[in-house]
Amino acid sequence: MKNICVIYGSSTGTCQGLAEKIGQQLSVQDDGIMDVQNLSSDVVNKYDVLILGTSTWGAGEMQDDWYDGVKVLKQTGLQGKTVAVFGCGDSESYSDTFCGGMAELYNAAKEAGAKMIGHVSADGYTYDDSEAVVDGEFVGLALDEVNEDDKTDSRIAAWVEDLKKNLD
């Protein structure tokens, strides 16, 4: 399998925990699971595949540390890279912006030239609106550790299996 890095932005630790679960299922070494605060051009250039994760804040924005991280992605460029995104949100309290931060991350990576993989059907999710849904699919894996934590492991497992098909 290709050289994979999981990069997360996490304010409360939730997204970090999800990144670690995803990384374990993809057999990523511990040094390949990192906080976006440690993102650099050298990191981007070292890996073939980047799995980017963010929590959603405010009116659907990505986690604060990602604003500098997105600058690194754009400055470095992602041509020749494969990227998938995941996000966490609260589908009950923030039903109108559920996992919206994921859309910002997806758009930034796509604009930087990445091949995007990992779309997930919005079927089975309960929310009112999300910037991260295009044509009935989330642009990546949407997770809700507040209201649907019982679905997290199976959603991650299915997503990782789908990713693996696109990484060989």
Image: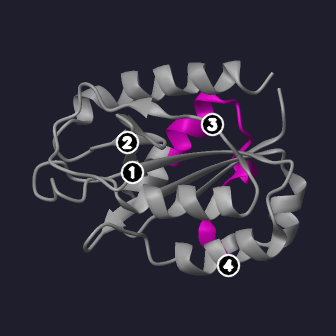
Q: Distance between the residues labelled 1 and 4?
A: 20 Å
Q: How far apart are marks 2 and 4 (CA)?
A: 23 Å
- Disc 2 target residue: 142
**Front in this rendered view, residue 160 or 27:** 160
- Disc 1 target residue: 132
Q: Is residue 67 left or right of residue 155?
A: right
Point out the tag, 2 or 4, that comes first from the N-terminus: 4
Residue 68, located in which quarter of the rendered image?
bottom right
Q: Give the range drawn in magenta.
A: 19-37
Point out the tag, 4 or 3, that comes first from the N-terminus: 4
Task: Look at the numbered discs 1 and 2 and tell me whether their residues touch, using CB distance below 8 Å.
Answer: yes
Q: In this view, does 167 lie above or below 85?
A: above
Amino acid tagged 2: Ala
What number is the disc on residue 117? 3
Amino acid tagged 4: Lys
Q: Please, what secondary structure does the residue beneath circle 1 have?
A: loop
Q: Is residue 55 left or right of residue 42?
A: left
Q: How crowded is mark 1: few (under 14 residues within 10 Å), some or many (20 or more)?
A: many
| Dominant SS in magenta | helix
Rendering coords of residue 117 (x, y %): 63, 36
Q: How far apart are marks 3 and 2 (CA)?
A: 14 Å
Q: Residues within 10 Å of mark 4 (few under 14, many from 20)?
A: some
- Disc 4 target residue: 71
Q: Is residue 44 above or below residue 158?
A: below
